[in-house]
Image (cartoon, rainbow, N blue to C red):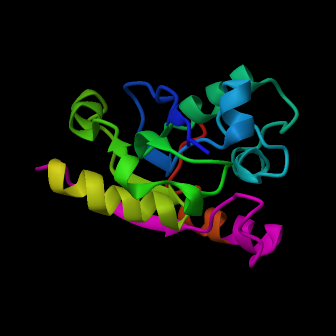
Amino acid sequence: MTKPLLFCFEPVADCNAEILILGSMPGQESLAAGQYYANRRNAFWKIMAELLEFDPGCSYEARLHELKTARIALWDVLKSCTRIGSLDASIDNSSITANNFQSFFAAHNRIRAVFFNGAKAESAYRQYVLPTISNVPLSYMRLPSTSPAHASLSYEQKLQAWRAALSPAEISLS
């Protein structure tokens, strides 16, 4: 079976972004819907709604607006790859093309912290992106994946880890 070549979405960011949350590559449901974290079992939007105090049932556009208002940008490490299904473990590493972070950070020069939504996002960034960027002083932290495939932690444990990283001192609600 031929693995399809998949492409990520454009970043969700404006010039005021101070925090960047990175996934690896959108899953099948997200790609089909054209929305980040569209799988209803993925805890990302539920966690963001809890942390930023918005209605998790609001429209996708409203959720993106809430992220931007909190100065949070959202993107994926991989620009393209081949994969069958949605699991990061199914990504064919020989097919990976990373996004252009040198240009992204130049255009979003207020970003000071990068949070990885899971291990694959972090490992891909360190392997494919970190060697290509220079003079970009950032702090990095891997957070537990919000994916339903990452079932070793409960929702509450994931929420606590995300809350600790994205504490009110780190995010702006104004």
Q: Which quadrant holds residue 101? A: top left
Compared with 99, 166 (above or below) is below
Give 170 or 47, whichever is nearer the viewer: 47
Which of the two residues, 3 or 30, is positioned nearer the viewer here? 3
Q: Residue at x 71, y 68 (%)?
A: 150
| Residue shown at the point (57%, 30%) measured from the top left | 69
Q: Which residues are magenta?
A: 133-160
Instruction: Locate residue 78, reporting x and y percent.
Output: 42, 44
Q: Main secondary structure of the magenta part?
A: loop
Q: Is residue 126 visible?
A: yes
Q: Nearer the viewer, residue 170 or 83?
A: 83
Query: How many labels sit on residues?
Result: 0
Q: Is residue 51 above or below residue 165?
A: above
Q: Quadrant of residue 93?
A: bottom left
Give the x, y percent position of residue 152.
Answer: 74, 79
- Left or right? Give the position of 53 relative to 15: right
Q: Is residue 42 left or right of residue 174?
A: right
Is residue 30 in the magenta section? no
